[in-house]
Amino acid sequence: MLLRPVLAVLLLAGCPGDDDALPQCDVLDASNVVIVTTDYSNAMHDVSDGSSVPLIGAPQGGHIMLVGARIRTATACQLTATAALRDPATQRVIGLEERPLLLEMRDDGLAVPRQGLDAMPNVAVCPSAASTTAVYGHTYKLELTLTRDGSPVVTTSAMVTPSCDGDAYCMQDCGGASP
């Protein structure tokens, strides 16, 4: 009988709790939020109008964009990020995801997304029945909204071109012809 309480204490001690969660961000400058994406080698890239955004093979199949933001904040923290890829011709959303954006501090005072699929929205964009054209190689609107405790912090967007970087499977999966 003594083993049950001891086992319960040991199990609870090994479980992550709310103490492991990152605090909500106190954004110091919402005017300088920069959209970032991560490529297949975990390299982070700033996104602006005209940027090429890499499509990454997703573990569950299809291709995704990893979308986050670089912001000025005081500490490592988290926001809620909603990222969408929208067809500018039809205004239809091609891919959409909301999840916690887990940010870590850099020496320059900016917070950037941690590496990994769980640290920023994984926007599933292909294959897509919502698109009227091939996803890769065509221009789409990438939208990002950051919220804190349900209140909007900033919304930003950029016209981008999803890229397969010569990957024939990606090109086929995302609506184009093989090279």
Image: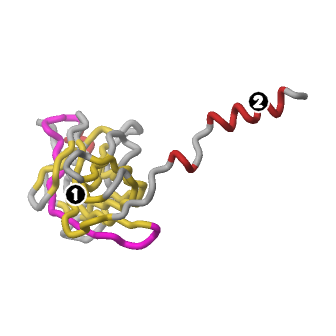
Left or right: where 79 falls relative to 131:
right
Residue 178 in picture, x, y percent from top left? 15, 37
User: Height in image: 67 above or below 39?
Assistant: below
Left or right: where 79 falls relative to 63:
right
Label annotation for residue 133 = none
User: Height in image: 77 above or below 26?
Assistant: above
Residue 117 in picture, x, y percent from top left? 37, 42
Foreground: 163 or 81? 81
Q: Please give the residue where the numbered disc 2 appears in the rendered image.
A: 7
**At 35% across and 53% down in the image, what residue appears?**
75
Instruction: Give the image quarter of residue 8.
Output: top right
Residue 28 in picture, x, y percent from top left? 28, 65
**At 25% across and 37% down in the image, what residue appears?**
42
Q: Amino acid at mark 1?
A: Ile
For marks 1 and 2, the one nearer the N-term is 2
Q: Which residues are magenta?
A: 149-169
Residue 121 in picture, x, y percent from top left? 36, 52
Which of the two marks, 1 or 2, is nearer to us in this view? 2
Cα–Cα gap, marks 1 and 2: 46 Å
**At 30% across and 59% down in the image, what residue appears?**
73
Q: Please give the residue where the numbered disc 1 appears in the rendered image.
A: 35
The quarter of the picture where the N terminus appears is top right
Q: Secondary structure at mark 1?
A: strand
